[in-house]
Image: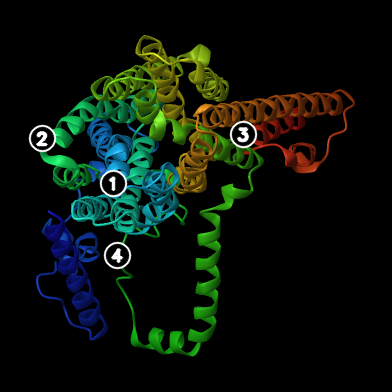
Amino acid sequence: MFWMYLHIRMHQEMDLQDGAKCKLDGEQPTGWATPASSVRRSQPPALRRGRGAWPHSAMAPRSGPPDGGWGWMIVAGCFLVTICTRAVTRCISIFFVEFQAYFGQDYARTAWIHSIVDCATMLCAPLGSLISNHVSCQVGIMLGGLLASTGLILSSFAASLEHLYLSLGVLTGLGFALCYSPAIAMVGKYFNKRKALAYGIAMSGSGIGTFILAPVVQLLIEQFSWRGALLILGGFVLNLCVCGALMRPIALKEDRKTAPGLLEQEYVPEVQKQDLKRMSICSPLIKAWSHECLCYCSWKEYDFLLMPGFMVLAVSVLFMAYGCSPLFVYLVPYALSVGVSHHQAAFLMSILGVVDIIGNITFGWLTDRRCLKKHRHFCYLFAVGMDGLCCLFLPVLQTFPLLVPFSFTFGYFDGAYVTLIPVVTADVVGTSSLSSALGVVYFLHAIPYLVSPPVAGWLVDTTGSYTASFLLCGFSMIFSSTLLCFARLAKKIKRTRLRSLTNDTHSKHHIWTNGAIAYSVTGELDQKDAELLSVDTSSYSNR
């Protein structure tokens, strides 16, 4: 299917070039409609014959997301992507003891494998968004599936930890990066009213995948050794190519940042030779102007980076990512260290995964309700804070019956806040910038994911206990939640003061021209507040 897609695009470009060349020479391109049909004449032959054209329902600009239809297939595709990426990444922790025993290395050096996978996945997330925005979401996910599968297959032949760093860490992580953020962003383009529920179902693939794959991977290791298990996982990850085929693009009117009708034609139908001569005279000026426009458009794609709300969210994500990563790496080794069997330790990961599903779906459904929809940020920080508390109590849980409730609680709230990450990001930056913003958000996970497991392993090697590692994780997540909470409260207080100031100016009848009061007062607010206050001022001035 990938090669068929490239074949179709190549023929479209050839037909367009032939048509443009014949038009310049004053000839009628072969197979074109008669000049009487202006609409048919403005279309290239490949589109008139229906070759390679997407259905009108998929490519025609919409006023808003459809909230259903093919969107549920997008959710299914994203569900499979999260299984093949995040669930497989979590199951790498099951290989931790096998790698440590086979290569004879300490905790810190072995933990770098899981760290590099997570780091590469998040560090290259903007690259996945870039390919999705400028080439195709389908191409990006299919390419990522091939890279991830190749990395896992090469890892089955590893002779050293350094080999695993490159194949399982860098190559597999890069493949996951090209798949993960574009698939998640595509769900946000198809849903608005039921966005949290759609994300809850899509992100539950991580929990379902962990629940199923954790015991399966342990069984594969026992039957075929860790090399055979990695080889089988490499074949399983190839399903990402199938997921990419489901990602049909959709055009939204809010995403069209050009003048109306500018992109309705593939090229300008009438070009005269005199016009070309005039254009050649001004070509240096045109090149300079076009370069400035392209640079401006590229910057506008990331203008959300200067939004105060996004800055606070970014800092909060850094501490949250630092706290959550080591637990998935060291839960199984910690359980083994307190006397839990291998099958029971793998079962803890399965419990964590299946409860993760419940957290994904229930929190997604609850935050779509009218009573909680306005408080998604507080639901997110509450879930992060609860996970932090779970980490603080983990060192005193040293038996299997006590670790089971921990897996239930931590898994539920982990699924809750993971579901709300794209929802909260969309509320901050808007749907049109969601793909780029998610790329940056997941990029911010990279450094904590890279650093935190080795640091936790170093603490285990130094102190001989997991207590310091888990306490550091817990305090990091609690700080992340507290920071976001204070930021939201400060913004709410500031918004209340500015609205009261606006009301005072209304009562004193100080009316400035063209909503200048609203502009001056709302310069420090976000876009939604500015629109609200500008409407209030304009309505007052019309009286």
Q: Which of 477/42 is in front? A: 477
Q: Secondary structure at mark 4?
A: loop
Question: For mark 3, does the 10 Å Cα neighbourhood hold few (<14), some (14 to 19), or many (20 or more) residues?
Answer: few
Q: Are marks 4 and 2 in contact (CB under 8 Å)?
A: no
Task: Give how far across and how far down residue 292 sits, in percent.
Answer: 55, 71
* Mark whose residue sits in front, 2 or 1: 2
Q: Is residue 131 left or right of residue 38?
A: right
Residue name at image x 42 percent, y 46 percent: 435
Q: Is residue 518 left or right of residue 92?
A: right
Q: Are marks 3 and 1 in contact (CB under 8 Å)?
A: no
Can the viewer see residue 415? yes
* Mark whose residue sits in front, 3 or 2: 2
Question: For mark 1, does the 10 Å Cα neighbourhood hold few (<14), some (14 to 19), or many (20 or more) residues?
Answer: some
**Disc 3 versus disc 2: distance between alpha carbons?**
58 Å
First along the sequence among labels 3 and 1:
1
Disc 4 marks a residue whose amino acid type is Glu
The mark found on residue 223 in the picture is 2
First along the sequence among labels 4 and 2:
2
